[in-house]
Every structure is written in C-alpha cells, then in structure tokens.
Image (cartoon, rainbow, N blue to C red):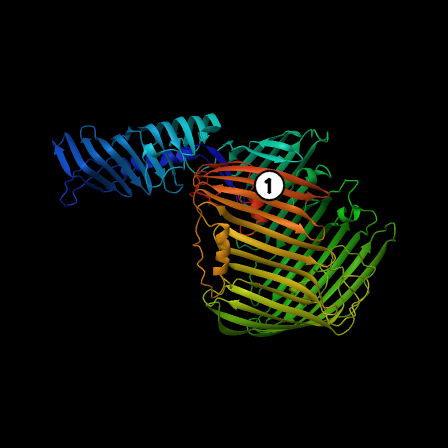
Amino acid sequence: MTLSATVIRTPHRPLVDWTPTAKAAGLLVLALSTSLPTHGQDQGGTRPGFTVPTPSHNGGLPLYFEADKLEGATGDQTRASGSVRLKQGDMTLRADELVHTQSDNTAKATGNVKVLRQGNRFEGPQLRLALDTLEGEFVRPTYWFSRVKAGGRADLIEFHGSNHLVANRATYTSCTPENTLDPAQFDPAWELVTSKVDLNFETNEGRAENAVVWFKNVPILAAPVLTFPLNDQRKSGWLPPSFDVDNRSGFEFSIPYYWNIAPNYDATLTPTLAVRRGTGLDTEFRYLLPTDTGTVHTYALPDDQLTGKNRGMIDLRHTGKVNWNPSGQFITSYDLRWRRASDDDFWKDFPRNLPSTTPRLYDSHLNVEHQLNSRSWGLGASQNTLYANVQDWQTLKDLDPEADAALSEVTAPYGRRRVGFNSRLSDTAGVAWHAQTELSQFTNPDPAKITGNRLHLTGSVDKMFGSPMGVMLQPRLSVNAASYDLNASPSTAARRLSKVIPTFSLDSSAVFERPVHLFKQDLIQTLEPRIRYVRTPYVDQSDNPLFDSAPRSFNQYSMYNENAFTGVDRISDANQVTLGVNSRMLNPDNGAELMNVAVVQKVLFSDQRINPDGPDPITQRLSDIQLQGATYVIPNWALDGALQLSAMKHRTERGVFGARYSPGPFKTIGLSYLYARNSSELVSLGWQWPIAGTSTSLTQMLKDALAASPGSSTEASTPGSSCGGTWYAVGRVNYSMLDKKVPNSLLGIEYDAGCWIGRVVSERVSVGRKTNSRIMFQLELVGLSRIGSSPLRALRENVPGYRLLREPNSLLSPQGSQPAFTDD
C-alpha cells in the first residue's frame, strides 16, 4: 500500500495526480478478480486436474490446473493437495491445498498461497474467493510489484466484487528484498502504514485512513484521510511539502495544492512561509484548448517583512494557431508572453522565482504570423508569410549605492512594433529567391536614446552548382535597403536617412572522404575545404541608429557571414575572402560524428572602414585565426575547444577548452577553461562520482582513466548502475583567476541506500556585489515520492552529464498515460 500524492508531469514535471495506494491494491485485485482459476481442464499428464464453472468475469480464458492429489465427490466438494498449480492467461496461483465447493462455486486455497502476474507477486497463508461474485478475503498477504520494485503487506484484504476491495492494516515500501517476501525479513528503512484502504474501481476513488510515512522508525508525514484516483488520471490533492534555507529569506516552507479543474484546465496553488519575509502564494494556472495552450504563473508576497513592500511577479504565456481551411494553408499562429516583476531588487531577493534566464531583463511580446501558402520545400516550392510583432522590456536596476555603475548598469533594449512580409522561392533550375520587407517603430525609456521608424527591404538571389556533399559553387547577390524617420532627441534633431547597399558573394566548397583505422575503430575521415569571397561597397552609416544591430561573436559561422553585424542597421563593407578547412571522423555504420576540427581565417584585399570593434578602420590584411575542435573518439572521453589567435600579435585573444570523462552511469567529471584577454579567465570543475560504498571509488577513477588510454593494460571497472549504500559527490565550482575568487559554486553529497536516497546540496551564486546562498535537503523514498527542497534542477543545469541515481519508476509516475499538457 502507498501514500497518495498529487504530481504534475510536463517536460519539467508530471501533470498527473496519482496515488500509489490504489495501484498497489489495484494490481492485486486485477490479479485475483480477472485471472483466478474459473475454468479448468486436465492437461493429460500424470498429475490429475478438474474443471470448475466459468463465471463472466474472466472472459472465458482456459485454465490449466494440476496437483499431486485430487479427492472428493462429484458435484459436491473437490480437494486438491500437494503442489497445487493453477494457470490462466498471465496469472499463476500456487498453494499447498485448494478446496473447491461446487454448490456456491467457492475456492479456498491454504498453505503458501502465491499469486504471480506480470512479474508481480502476492503471497499469504490463506485465500478464499467466491468465483461467481469475486467476494472473499486474502489473509495476511504480502505483495511485490516489479515495475517499482516495491511492495508491502496487509493483515487482511477483503474483496467485495470485481471492482471493490478493502485492505486492513496495509503497508508499502521499496525496502523489500526482491527475492523473498518473508514477513520475518521485513525491516524497512521507510514504510507507509495505513489502518485501512478502501478501493472502489467503479467510482475510480480510493480512500486511505491514518496514513503515516515512517523513516528510520520516525514518522515524517501523516494524514488522517487521503483520497486518490485508482488509475493514471489527475486528481485534486496536496503535493508533498518542500522547504528551502537561504541567507536572504531564511527558512522557507511551502506545501503545494494541485487543483484538477477540468481535463484541460488545472492549477497549482503553493502557500509559502518564509521566516524573515512572511507568507506568500505561488500559483500556476494551465490550460489546453483545441488550438491554444498557455500558463499563468504568479508569485505574490503581500507584505515583505524585510522591505515593508508588496513583492511579486507575473509570467503569462499563450500560444495558438488558426487553420483557415482543411488543406493546411492560410495558417495564423500567435505567441504571447508577458512578464513583470514588482521592483528592481526582485532579481536579487528571489532568484528561484525569476521568470527569465536573464535575471534583469524581462521580455514581453506578441507575435502573429499568417502563412499564405503551405510549407512545402524543394525545387519549385515557395513560402510567403505576413507577420506582426509588439515587444517591450522591463529592465531591473541595481539599487546598491556601492555597486560599480560601469559593471552593474544594464542598457534597456529597444521596444518595437513591426509588420512585415517574408517570401522564399526556389525554381526548378535551382535558383533561390528571398525577399523581406518590414516597417518598424522603435522606442526606448531612455530619453537620450534615438527613437523613430524604419522601413527596410532585404533581398537575395543565389544558384547552387554541384552538390553540398561533393563539389559546390554558389554565387549570391543580395541588397539591403533602409529608410529612417528619426525623432528629435536632446542631442539630435528630427531627420530622415536612407541607404541602399548591395553585396556579392561567391561560396565554394568540396567534400573528400577516405577510410581510416584509429583508436581500434574503422572510421571515415573527411576533408572539407571552403572558400568564400564577399564584396560589399562602403556606405557611410555613422548617422544611422543601432536599433537591432550588434557585432557578431567571433566564431566559425560569423567569419563566413557576409556582414560583421547582426540586424540591418549596420552593413560592414567588405572586399575579402574567407579560407577554411574542416575535417571530421564519422562512424561508417550510423554516420555519427566522432571528431571535428576546423581552421578559418579571413584575408582582406582592402581596408574595412566599418569596424564592429571600434571607430578605426581595419587595416591589417589577415584576420585573427579561428581554431576549433571536438572529439569523442577516445572511449569515455569528450574533448572540445576553440581558439582565437591574433595573426599580427601572435597571441591568444580568446579561448575555451573542455574535457569530460564519463566511464559509466553516475560517473562523470568535467573541466573547462574560458579565457578572454583583459576580460575574464574562468576555470570550472564539475563532477558526479561515487566516493564510498559498494560502487567505484575515486581511486578506481584514475585506473579507469588509464584503462581508457590506447594500448593500456589497466583493467577498468565495469560500468553499471549504483547499488545500495553508495556515497556520491556532486557539484561544480567556478573560479575566476582574474578576481581570485569563486563567484559560483554548487557542492553536494548524495547517498543511495537502495530503497531511499538522501541529498544535501549547498549553492552559492553571486548577485551583484552580494551572494545568495542556500542549502537544499531532499529525501527520496524510491517508489513513493521525494520530500524536501529539490536540488535536481540545479544539478542538471550545472553538472554536465549529471544523471539521476534512480530513473523515475515510482508509482507516483505512472507509465500508462501521457500528460495532457506540455511545457517548454
């Protein structure tokens, strides 16, 4: 028997309210009510058998019955003894003795009664069942369920027909040896105990009375009455409580309530109590319509005792589409996002409630796109789209008077309203056309910023000769035209500007392959040279605003790009050729890429007057060199890196390197190094590794690393899942070599005891000049639920390759049904 708990499952969490108490007894009643022997036949062997009438419950499945001895009068009572075995469908019943009374069609099994079905086991000293009505009782049964590797026992299970049973004094735990159900060996670390469980499958309701979860002989959860559904459907109810401890809010306790409003509506209401701040409410409402879906997430702290202000935030998301005809053409899709925080200090005080990955910038927008024709691709295919967009930002300031203004200031992005038309076309000759026109209005809360309207048109035409997988030549002609109507600002007067800039490029590439044998593997090596010439005339754009343009990051993609800027406000002049070569190692069986190395450099034939890095023109003819590579060829190792080398100064300007060693599940350790000259130098170490217990230790880690080296004779440990009694170290530490400090760290310990897992994780994050610290404690009762503050999200986001010690197999995470909602 298990405790009910409502769980929501999406890609982030399940959306199913489900109670394992129901399933535990449900499997038993299914095993007995639908599969007990009701029709038998002699199999023609040396052991005798008999036939009983067939009630309507079993669907007429044939019964195979055998025993060492049969005795009794025909039409009265039949006794089978000595290794009695009954089999019907996927159910098998064994007992020392079985007595069948034909007058009331009742079977009574005694002595080592065992029921086996679909890997689930039920055992007890005595079972009585009326085969016509499926009424009876199972005395002191024990049970074990294969999917969750958990089970329990009861003093008595009463069957009241095929759809109703009552279990008295029932328990549930995953701390049960899989090879025995002997009650004498029950000494679980945790156990759920209930005085009575009533399961009614007709109404799909279960009721547990006096449910208590015991851990190490200490009660940790209790409820006088629990109700729950008996299948994978959602149901309103309380979720397990959680708590957090951090240096800003102190101890914070929350207990969520899940409200199953309708099949396509639900809500989670989470009252919170923070010792330092007071009481608050976190809510999430979700809905799913035939063509629309969305969520409304809010957090409210009416009276923050630390600040004396009302605090909170809102995050609304809605997406949908309209199909205007059955053919799938003329589709209108829309996307709405609205995010707001109550004050500028919200990002510091409530980092776990932030609605954005950029803690001080909150984007709100409405995007509408109308598709004028179907999205069919290939020669002769086209796509035409009308679109409109409204976007605004909330920028949170750093109100700390001692903060460095140059470092803490965040520039507010431009808000914009725009409408546009986008068209793509390719004809049967392989010529591809692209055109986009857009009218935009840009605003900014800073009065010193330039604002105004922009009308722009971009277009291109290109034709590919050859094949991308062989020898390819692709000429391309493009144009960028823009007209500005700018408003007056404190430093400039209202004015109108325009520009028309053409660009010609010629892209060529080739792919060569050869078989190689490397690291005891047969591979395919490619050699892929690429040359791209770009010619863009210089046009003075110094008076043009920078509404949505910014310098591109230095990488392989940007070096081959025609423009050194994103957006359309800046078009860099160019008379250059980009030279590069790429080599890959491929698995010949499945095409998987096991290694990739590349080198790219630009050669300027004339000065580049529009410099993305400053006001002075670029006069040097050779650009910095981009080197990058990644490999998975060495067993258990993943290596990657990128370098920006100055061709003139012969030094490294930027670099990033990473190495990760993962010899098996739950064993990963990674080291990364990030360097930017005069800007940052950061070393990061992340790990998940067994340090004590029955699994691989740190000493074995070094042996595994040596064993992975080619030609090594060192014997590596066998990868495998962890087992009970193993300690794991998890964490990640970032160290700034320029600042000589640790800005962020995550340190924790996990203990896998087989049927329960304990986690203690400490997180420290720099927020402005200060830091946020919190400690997370979690107890996972395998096969039941997780209790406490969850560090799993922080571990997944910070530790590359982190894996759960036990994949979700709890009765709280049913496999039968899929959630009705999805969440990005």
Q: Is residue 410 visible?
A: no
Q: Which residue has dot 1 on it?
A: 762
Total of numbered circles in the picture?
Answer: 1
Position of 553 relative to 298 (above/below): below
Q: Nearer the viewer, residue 759 or 295?
A: 759
Q: Secondary structure at mark 1?
A: strand
Is the residue 766 above or below the residue 100 in the image? below
Question: What percent of the width, then of the height, locates residue 560?
Answer: 67, 67
Q: Is residue 82 left or right of residue 605?
A: left
Q: Please name whichever residue, 26 or 442, is drawn nearer the observer in this view of the structure.
A: 26
Query: Hey, what amino acid is under mark 1?
Result: Ser
Indicate the quadrant where residue 439 lies. bottom right
Say if 195 sits above or below 266 in the image: above
**Residue ID at (23%, 32%):** 109
Q: Residues within 10 Å of mark 1 (few under 14, many from 20)?
A: some
Asked whether residue 205 is in view, the answer is: yes
Q: x, y percentage for residue 21?
A: 41, 33
The residue at the far left in this view is: 73
Q: Nearer the viewer, residue 2 or 250?
A: 250
User: Which quadrant is home to the N terminus?
Assistant: top left
Which one is nearer the viewer's eye here, 382 or 814?
814
- In percent of width and height, residue 219 lies at 47, 28
| Residue 328 position (above or below residue 393) | below
Residue 562: percent from the left, percent from the top? 70, 67
Residue sitting at x 51%, y 74% = 514
Asked whether, in this view, residue 496 is left or right of residue 457, the answer is right
Q: Quadrant of residue 621?
A: bottom right
